[in-house]
Amino acid sequence: MNIESLTHSEIRNMSIECDKVGGFNLSQGISNLNLNNKLVEGIDRALKRGFNYYTQFDGDFELKNALSKKIISYNKINLDNKKIIVTSGATGAFYCACFAVLKPNDEVIVFEPYYGYHIKTIEAVGAKPTYVTLKGKDFDIDFEELENIITDRTKAILICTPSNPCGKIFSENDLQKLGLICKKNNLIVFTDEIYEYFLYDNKEHVSPGSLEIFDDNTITISGYSKTFSITGWRIGYCVVPEKYFEPIGHISDLFYVCSPSVLQNAVAYGINEINKNFYYNLIKKFTYKRDLLCSVLFDIGLNPTIPKGSYYIMADASSVDGKTSKEKAMQILNDTKVACVPGSEFYHSNKGENFVRFCFAKEDEILNQACNNLLKLNK
Ligand SMILES: Cc1ncc(COP(=O)(O)O)c(C=O)c1O
């Protein structure tokens, strides 16, 4: 990878622009919600128990135990022939997995709109992303386009469900069809499920790795950055077929050694002690935030696609002045002091120029003020 091509993402750029005007930052996916008491207790407990040292290369034993129970019961993934590796966030999991299983010039299919880190990570290991554009208002998969893009260099495919940036949830039906194509072409499946608990309108999360068709070649990636609002703790993991356990685990050891041991242990305590209500309330709170922001976006003519999961909204910015999505996002910031992300950040071609993305993982008070400001676009 050409290091010079590594520039700040538009998400960071918009955050800087937002700070300059003292605005409301709905661009970055940082959820600054209150920390659950059980996690505070978990840190205290881990400190008192002396969790100050490197953990095993694949993670703290107690965290792995807690994760196993959760992965079997929530994700319905059969762990008989798979193993868990605790990683430095979901970001670390994806990087180590790519590093371990891809070779230079391998192609990896990515659905667009995509999450920029996925692309940069694939490129960082010398592999090449190829793109399938999700179609229409509901971001549907065009299976014909998908089959047509497969070459003899295609090694893997990446699924992000629920999706950042468009909030799509891949249905079981979508996944079964995808699984057949992957099996036929012997593709490795990376699946990033970091938003697995952010589900709306009674939608259910289906982990591709729970379906038989994906069983033996799927690397499931997730973590607690988003669910527990602890993005700075760097606690993620991947669930991998046994054949990938040593290679990915050793790369993770080489790059990161381990995630902070106290925090690993605190998350284990959190997973075990935080009850169902927490997850139920998460959905309730975020449904309220989603509905609030979507209704304002409809009011001001930035028609959104209502996300089924995650905490982002893709909105149609055709009505905003500006030739590019960057100009449109800057116009919105100048007029309302609300920062969003230009759609170009999520597409490799110019298909994103009429979109902007808003993040609604913000305290209600901030979201309310941002919504009031956005209404100025109506005038
Ligand atoms: C799709 C997706 N995956 C991974 C991450 C980062 O997760 P982590 O903090 O666990 O590295 C993000 C953060 O925005 C994301 O949107």
Image (cartoon, rainbow, N blue to C red):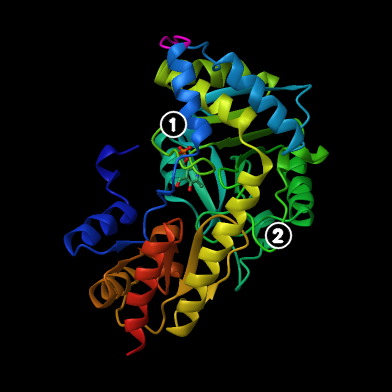
Residue 143, label in figure:
2
**Helix or strand or loop: what does disc 2 sit on?**
helix
Give the total number of marks visible in the rendering: 2
Q: Amino acid at mark 1?
A: Arg
Q: Amino acid at mark 2?
A: Phe
User: Residue beneath label 1, please?
Assistant: 234
Q: Residue furthest right?
A: 212
* Vertical position of residue 259 compared to residue 120: above or below: above
* The C terminus, quarter of image: bottom left
Mark 1 neighbour density, 10 Å: few (under 14) some (14–19) many (20 or more): many
Q: Inspect this view and state whether residue 316 appears.
A: yes
Q: Which region of the structure is painted magenta?
A: 49-54
Residue 299, label in figure:
none
Residue 41: percent from left, percent from top: 49, 27
Residue 284: percent from left, percent from top: 61, 58
The residue depicted at 62 percent of the width and 50 percent of the height is 161
Residue situated in front as seen by the camera: 131 or 175: 175
**Helix or strand or loop: what does disc 1 sit on?**
loop
Q: Inspect this view and state whether residue 101 appears.
A: no
Q: Residue furthest bottom?
A: 379
Mark 2 neighbour density, 10 Å: few (under 14) some (14–19) many (20 or more): some
The residue depicted at 47 percent of the width and 51 percent of the height is 115
Residue 283: percent from left, percent from top: 61, 55
Q: Earlier in the sequence, mark 2 or mark 1?
A: 2
* Vertical position of residue 108 compared to residue 27: above or below: above
* The N terminus, quarter of image: top left
Q: Is residue 335 left or right of residue 149?
A: left
Reply yes or no: does residue 350 show up in magenta.
no
Residue 40: percent from left, percent from top: 46, 30
